[in-house]
Amino acid sequence: MAHSELLATVRRSLSPDTHIEVRATRSEYERVQEILDEEDAKFPTLQYDGFRKVAIVEAAPSPLHGDMDARDRPNIKDGISISNDRRNTRDTGDTSTTRNWDGALTYLTREGGTLMVAVEVGLSQTYGSLRAAISFSVCALRCRVGIAMFINEGDRVTVPTVRYYDTRKEKLSAIREIEHDLDSQLQVNPFGPLRIGEETWFGKVTKVVLETYRPEDETTPPESLLDPKQSFTIVENGRFVGGEVPPNLADITIGDCIPTHILTGNNIEATPANFFQQDWFENTFRFAMLATAMERVRDKSKVQHV
């Protein structure tokens, strides 16, 4: 195909969690998407905003991003599952919008699946882009509720240089040593920073905010940009401050996870759904931080060929 800024962008080497918006027509987006489909490329992924006529290029998520995605909490009710189809298209305006979500809870019946809860997670991602993504899931895809998690990583003061090793065995041994060192640091500073000498592999987590989003009513236009209904800061300047956050995010109930007609007569629709537990959050977050840092370590560790 002729020179395409969009195609050139998806061909670039993109760092994890990179988010780039490119002006493009719907037909150009579809042509580039076909190329990625033919190549069976998992990343980068493409989305299309029909309102603004821009294609959205998303690089592979870092482990911190991916591991904090939606989790199917146990003991809620059979039929709830995590949606595996992460690309969804809806007609919007004079063209259509295609977006990916980070996670979604779906209720499965013999008639198919119904989207119930959408989740978006951003690692140092702009507030506007995450807000637009969760608003689309709630307004255009008609999810009952959206949960957004905003994770701000403090500046990594230094950009680690490439480390060269004589053999693969030497490289793997060094990586294991670094992982052990970083893991030990997390026992003291659970939200970073993670450093080896003068090199910072993950900056101190300055803030983690959870927000819930709901449609205004059943007639809310699909292009609406919602304001959060509730917002909780659970990490501030590298310290967990979520003690006042209700375990269920205050307003997420069984009725948000299971279609109302399934619950008729059960009197459980208003029962809180346990989407947030402090122990689960802290353990998952620390594991994901370490995995993200180690992904950066591996990316900068090379065997020197002579």
Image (tube, rainbow, N blue to C red):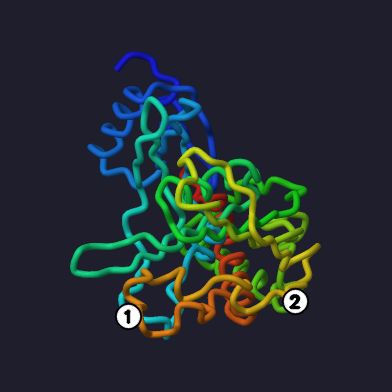
**In the picture provided, is 60 more to the left or to the right than 17?**
left
Q: Does 272 sit above or below residue 100?
A: below
Q: Residue at x 45, y 78 (%)?
A: 269
Quarter holding residue 257: bottom left
Q: Residue at x 42, y 81 (%)?
A: 76
Q: Does 252 sit above or below residue 133?
A: below
As drawn, the label of residue 244 is: 2
Find the residue positioned furthest to the top.
Answer: 2
Q: Nearest the camera: 159 or 93?
A: 93
**In the picture provided, is 228 more to the left or to the right than 55?**
right
For badge 1, the amino acid type reads Asp
Q: Earlier in the sequence, mark 1 or mark 2?
A: 1
Residue 90 percent coordinates (x, y): 35, 40
Q: Does 77 sit above or below residue 132?
A: below
- The residue identified by callout 1 is 78
Residue 141 percent coordinates (x, y): 40, 50
Q: Can residue 275 be seen by looking at this rendering? A: yes
Residue 56 percent coordinates (x, y): 47, 35
Q: Are marks 1 and 2 in contact (CB under 8 Å)?
A: no
Q: Nearest the camera: 13 or 67?
A: 67
Q: Does 5 sit above or below residue 36?
A: above
Q: Residue at x 43, y 25 (%)?
A: 6
Residue 194 percent coordinates (x, y): 71, 63
For badge 2, the amino acid type reads Glu
Q: Tell me the SS state at disc 2.
A: helix
